[in-house]
Image (spheres, rainbow, N blue to C red):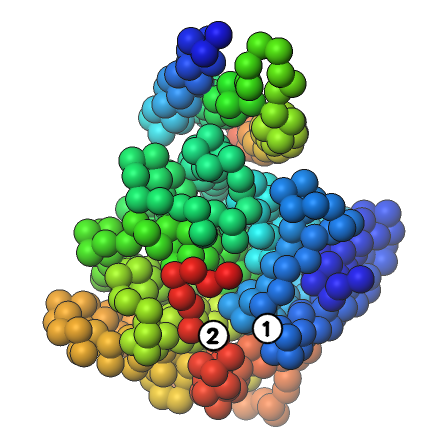
Amino acid sequence: MNSIIWLVAIPLLGALLCTVFPRLANRIGWMFAAGNMLAALLVMHTVSQEGAFHYVIGGWSQGLGIALFADSLTALMVVMSAIIALAVSIYSTAYFTDTKKQAFYWPLWLLLLTALNALFVSADLFNLYVTLELLGLAAAALTAMGGSKEALSAAIRYLLIGLIGSLTFLAGVVLVYTAYGTLDIAVLTQQFQNNKVSWAIATLMTLGLMIKAALLPMHFWLPPAHANAPAPVSAVLSALVVKAAIYLMLRLWPDIFYPLANIGISYVLGGLGAAAIMWGSYQALRAQRIKLLAAYSTVAQVGYLFLGLSLIIVLPDGELRHAVMVGVVLLALTHAFAKAALFLAAGVIMQRGGHDRISDLDGTAQTLPVTTFTLALACVALIGLPPSGAFLGKWQLLTVLLHEGLWFWIIVVLSGSLLSAAYAFRLLGHAFGKKNIPHKRLAIGLEELPALVLSLIATLVLAFASAPVAKFIQPLSGVSQ
Amino acid sequence: MLIDQILYGLCGIVLFTFGLRIAFSPVHFLRRLLAINVAGAGLFLLLLSVAYRGFDQAPDAVPHALVLTGIVVAFSATALAVALARQLQNRDKENE
């Protein structure tokens, strides 16, 4: 028995139990999220001891059974999701007070976690398609739990666009089987050649993942879906579900598609990333509500990750490429923790104050000091101020860009940070604004703690953990297996 | 017989592109949902044509398994989409 299998088994079992015992869903739910955390740590331990490993369920021969795979990137993603999942789960026990809603929420949320974990550890392209689709279904159903008319129509749009994305990905998978007769990533990495079919495969899969990752110009579905879902759901969608598509890009391009890498594709992906940074930050600056601001900021952050990816694609294997890889992973981790914290904090503000309009936030620092502190920490991480993980990530990115003399990208990264500082301070300016409210003693609600912990991880823990993380990520090579 | 295989494959590709074309256009939700299903069916047709290995040989079983899985996934996605659309419709009726 291998530790990796628990990553899928534990949340799946939890989802089933929550369906069978809806009255106990709250308790079962967070316990299984904690169990998932143990499984994730176990996988990370195995990877750090033995390196990357393969596992075939049931001992079937290669190509028949379901193959699972974990390396350092997988381990980091899995642990990141597990920490955020636990925090969101604890928050959800306080957020959904209605037992009927709990009975809907917990099975869907644990199924989403199952799909996410399965996606991270899949070693086979078709399983990646299935998990991508499952993730989209669970995410759309959870979005609809917002209940409002806007939430429902956003959920439908999210579902349809997600279906189009995964179908496009599937078209690439079908062509892979037609051309190479295998779907195993490790085998494909060795057999992949630079020809017309391969280009069609790469184009289809990349387009599908661009839709799923909400890269500009395919971002239009993200803000309504993320802004209208219930707070814990928005946190998971923005922090984790978007990352799944980016994780796949990081998996596919340096490994399977390595023979296709050229400067042209790098400029296309980098250019779209740069446009996403500017457009997302600008829209976040104009947003009237915290959740909409957070959603547009996700569009911008996806841009940074694609900009980094465009460098990973063209740089030859070596120190520079490793530096970019570390930068991208740090940015992805920081964004996940900070954005989850921001959405959870927005949820607290909405539940206490009844709204999340930025212009009416004055006095929040007096009524909800802890949550306002959380907002501030999350903003520090989103701007990329030191000592957050994003600061170190951007630093890595800028160092390589300087070394390569890519001035235009440097301007984009710096002005993007400036814009994000602008929208963050606009939010904080109102949150810290004074209002005549009778003085109260400092009180911390249980539902404020998960967001606080997440924002502390984004700003402080990741800063200290960056060196071990950099060491942990093995230098990726074109033919890694 | 090889001609048949190419014909089926091409037919699948045509269905896929037509389906996606409609799925991206601003038509009624149900038409877009059906178009996505047509596109999916096109891909399954292409995958099945790949499974053919000659008249007197058993077809490749892997694409069959993939198509079966794909059909189940497509079915659940369609069901979820229709369920959500019905909820939205009910909401509209309440407001009237």
Q: Position of residue A440 (x, y in %)?
A: 59, 89
Mark 2: give few (<14), some (14-19) or many (20+) Cα within 10 Å: some
Please state which of residues A16 and A94 is positioned toward the viewer in this rendering.
Answer: A16
> How many labels, in total?
2
Quick check: B43 left or right of B91? left
- The residue depicted at 32 percent of the width and 74 percent of the height is A318
Instruction: Report the side of A34 relative to A128 (left or right).
Output: right
Q: Nearer the viewer, residue A177 or A447?
A: A177
Which residue is painted at 43% across and 60% down in the image?
Answer: A479
Q: Amino acid at mark 1?
A: Gly
Note whether B62 is above or below A214 in the view shown.
above
Label 2 SS? loop
Q: Residue at x 60, y 90 (%)?
A: A442
Q: Earlier in the sequence, mark 2 or mark 1?
A: 1
Q: Which image quadrant: the N terminus of chain A?
A: bottom right
**Which mark is drawn over residue A474?**
2
* Image position of A20 with respect to B92: above or below: below
- Judge the density around disc 1: few (<14), some (14-19), many (≥20) Cα neighbours within 10 Å: some
Judging from the image, mark 1 belongs to the subunit labelled A
Horizontal and vertical percent position of residue B36: 47, 26
Camera-nearest residue between B43 and A344: B43
Q: Is residue A350 visible?
A: no
For this orientation, the residue located farthest to the front is B56
Determine the image quadrant of residue B54: top right
Real-space CA distance between mark 2 and mark 1, rounded to the nearest whole angstrom = 9 Å
Q: Are marks 2 and 1 in contact (CB under 8 Å)?
A: yes
For residue A131, side relative to residue A29 (left or right): left
Pointer 1: what residue?
A51
Q: Position of residue B91 (x, y in %)?
A: 57, 33
Chain name for mark 2: A
Closer to the camera in the image, B25 or A10: A10
